[in-house]
Amino acid sequence: MSDIAVIDYGMGNLRSVSQALEHVAGGKTVTVSSDPAVIAAAERVVFPGQGAMPDCVRELDSRELRAAVVDAAASKPFLGICIGQQLLFEHSEEGNVDGLGILAGRVRRFPSGMSDADGAKLKVPHMGWNQVMQAMDHPLWAGIDRDARFYFVHSYYVDPADPTLVGAWTEYPFRFASAVARNNIFAVQFHPEKSQQAGLALLSNFVNWDGRP
């Protein structure tokens, strides 16, 4: 049995995620797998993802991993990263596709023509370092500054139906939910595996998290 399973559905930066987890795992095993049985047996599950939402949904279903993700999100410490966060919600504007519906809300695209407070145009995708303002106390934020900077690459963001899900927000140029949390689920839009010390701290907290808020 693996301590930590990283779900492989062909759409994540799996090497970077697994290497970052191994760096902080403290001897716990990290397994990258597309086998539902391995995912079911793991104590903790990481659900990464990159690319377009319709492609991610198609790959998830073609590998018969949908049920494994839903079951893991219902039963054990679960970390979603980037598209792995977006897929937890009900529907995405990207390709007009349904997500897994584990969390209520939609995934929306940043509008074109955005500008910052000084009138400078903002690019889509939102790419680079930005502050993540913690909106709740949570074990995964332990030891991390409440306004720490993390690395983002995305054109879409989650819009939870329930504001109490928001674990952190980021401005670009308006506030959007850059982390969400409910019970044993914690999911982030940014890439902790690319976010240096703050990202490693979050992953270390996850490795030691018992799934309670």
Image (cartoon, rainbow, N blue to C red):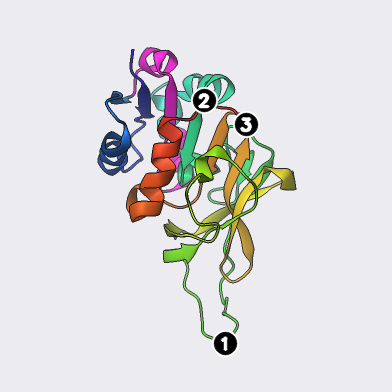
Q: Nearer the viewer, residue 145 or 78?
A: 145
Asked if the residue at tag 3 contacts the one at tag 2, i.e. Cβ–Cβ closer than 8 Å, the answer is no
Indicate yes or no whether the magenta region holds residue 138: no
Q: CA distance from mark 2 to mark 3?
A: 20 Å
Q: Residues within 10 Å of mark 2 (few under 14, many from 20)?
A: some
> Residue under circle 3?
102
- Which x, y percent locates residue 76? 52, 22
Secondary element under disc 3, as helix, strand or loop, is loop
Q: CA distance from mark 2 to mark 1?
A: 44 Å
Residue 30: image quadrant is top left
- Which is more N-terminal, label 1 or label 2? 1
Q: Nearer the viewer, residue 69 or 171?
A: 171
Q: Is residue 60 above or below residue 135?
A: above
Instruction: Please report the residue visible at 36 percent of the width from the left and 40 percent of the height from the top.
Output: 11
Badge 1 amino acid = Asp
Foreground disc of the pair 3, 1: 1
> Residue under circle 1?
118
> Residue under circle 2?
210
Image quadrant in which the N terminus is located:
top left
Q: CA distance from mark 3 to mark 1?
A: 38 Å
- Which x, y percent locates residue 184? 58, 28
* In this picture, residue 121 sits left or right of residue 63: right
- Which x, y percent locates residue 181? 61, 39
Secondary element under disc 2, as helix, strand or loop, is loop
Asked if the residue at tag 1 contacts the one at tag 3, i.e. Cβ–Cβ closer than 8 Å, the answer is no
Magenta residues, as a range?
A: 34-58
Foreground disc of the pair 2, 1: 2
Instruction: Please report the residue visible at 43 percent of the width from the left and 19 percent of the height from the top.
Output: 43
- Which is more N-terminal, label 3 or label 2? 3
Residue 90: image quadrant is top right
Asked if the residue at tag 1 contacts the one at tag 2, i.e. Cβ–Cβ closer than 8 Å, the answer is no
Badge 3 amino acid = Ile
